[in-house]
Amino acid sequence: TPGHVDFTIEVERALRVLDGGVLVLCGVSGVQSQSLTVDRQMKRYNVPRVAFVNKLDRTGSNPWKVINDLRDQLKLNAAAVQIPIGLEGEHEGIIDLIEQKCLRFTGEKGELILESDDIPADLQEMFNEKREELIEKLADADDEIGEMFLMEETPTSEDIKAAIRRQTIACKFVPVFMGSAFKNKGVQALLDGVLDYLPEPSEKANFALDRSNGEALVEVTGKSDDSLLALAFKLEETQFGQLTYMRIYQGMLKKGSQIVNVNDGKKIKLARIVRMHSDDMEEIDQAESGEVVAMFGIDCRSMDTFSDGNMNLAMSSMFVPEPVMSLAIKPADNKMQNNFGKALNKFTKEDPTLRVKVDDQTKETIISGMGELHLEVYIERMKREYGVEVVSGKPNVNYKETISMKQEFDYLHKKQTGGSGQYAKVIGYIEPLTTEEQKELGKINDFVNGCIGTNIPPEFYSSCQKGTNDAMTQGSLVGSEVEGVRVVLQDGASHAVDSSDQAFRTAMAQAIRGAMKQARPSVLEPVMSVEVDCPSEFQGTVVAGINRRMGLIQNSDMNEDGSGVKVLAEVPLANMFGYSTELRSNTQGKGEFTMEYHTHTPVPKNVQEELEKKYREERAAAE
């Protein structure tokens, strides 16, 4: 089920190691903003899925709207394998379209199932229509059913089940189950569906990277008697030490045996293996291929690969989104510096979306993450688990700099000291790179060496490139990273004694920074795609709030019955701080929003001037 957008990495890491999933959707709201995020993640790792439309006992539930959303918004070939017996307050159970049986769930927790072959007369027409639709959708994906459909033969329930299994595993079809999890209605049938349609570990193709052969893809066998290959995908701090969750792709893990961390070559002896049942741990002696187990006493990072030492294979890591928000932090008491460092080291090991760096200019410790809540949680954990009170400053937004015209440079760096001095001259030009060119090159900046002859000795070319990189990491306007710039080095001059690596590196960095100031530079700010869901009576307030934050409304959609509205907007991240609190107070706690990084766009002139002034003041204070 989709969680909070700040913790999207937890969904990401789970889908990286799973062989199948159940996409849970709300029977009233249908496909929500987080469902789209989770769908993208499932497609990224080719995870076969079944869908479950939940909350059919709630007012306004409509499973057919949800299935249409699956087809239109998520572009999935989805069809119902069940139809509900009654909706809202009259929801009693489901009719299985394949086995042609009625299942009614009674008892306090839906534990008593009444099964019958009699389909209610008022549902017979819908039953026939939806069964036809199921076979039709299946025929689009599966050749065997497609042939039967064309020959006008009626497939048996075994044919339909086999076809659904084949196409679900191939990610070409999504069977949709329905019910109400609160009263356990339809859950038993869903679990049967998981067994019937989702793959066994050996049926899903998983690939490792051969490190001795240029990271070529190698298919994992999935057999328990082959060499071990396992992936540590989640770390958790417990009272007994670090608990490492591991997915075994092939081979076996045995208590007391030695395993090797492929990433750093360390050998580790397995002291304890446990199988997790929620919070309960069950001690086990061995685990086979396809299992997910947890271990104590292993020091590693999230996404490390383990083997028994016979292979140089590594499992591919997962996709880690870029952080969108930064916070300057320091311990309130300097005596706690040691614990502060320990905590940050531990947290970055277990969560790849949390980044820590020390700012070269301000010497502040900056933590970056996926949003306000994400960073708040880690500050709270530092206090709770390590006893470190933290002082945090207003988060810094990840600004970038770029240029908008071509500008030539001709720069001489000359410094005479007691011994040999420094001498380097560089000539060339900088020009803007378009987004298309950046995509084509696969990088945000480009360095082109167009020198002919040996005015600049070839051994200094790499120094010129390093100087370019220095200028790109810290721009001249607000000290941010530079993107969208091509640097072309055309000529230069050197001195037989005074020229050095450092001289050319400094000359290149200064030349580019000087040229950027004349190339109509601009500051880019991150703009977020924001999606707000709220009851329709608050639409005006929400739109006004987004406009106040300099947002651009892209779209505004009312749901079918007009009770709720979905507003899509693009808002600068710098203006989004504190928005969650404002939205809750303006919508009586009923509004919710998600945002993800969209692009970087130039800031207005007045904002740019303010940022430049602030940067100059900070530098003056630091000096």
Image: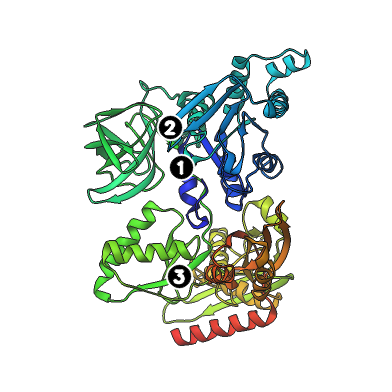
Circle 1 packing at 10 Å, graded few (<14), some (14-19), many (20+), is some
Q: Is residue 299 above or below residue 138?
A: below
Colour mapping used in the image: rainbow
**Mark 1 or mark 3: which comes first in sequence?**
1
Mark in front: 1 vs 3: 1
Residue 511 visible somewhere in the drawing: yes
Mark 1 vs 2: CB contact within 8 A = no
Residue 181's tag is: none
Residue 210 percent across, percent down from the top left: 46, 33
Q: Residues within 10 Å of mark 2 (few under 14, many from 20)?
A: some
Instruction: Say which residue appears at 49% left-offset and 72% top-offset.
Output: 395
Q: Which residue is mark 1?
A: 14
Tell me which residue sits at (48%, 68%) in the image.
326
Rendered position, 453 above or below 230: below
Residue 101 in which image quadrant: top right
Which residue in the structure is indicated by mark 2? 111
Q: Position of residue 384 (x, y in %)?
A: 29, 64
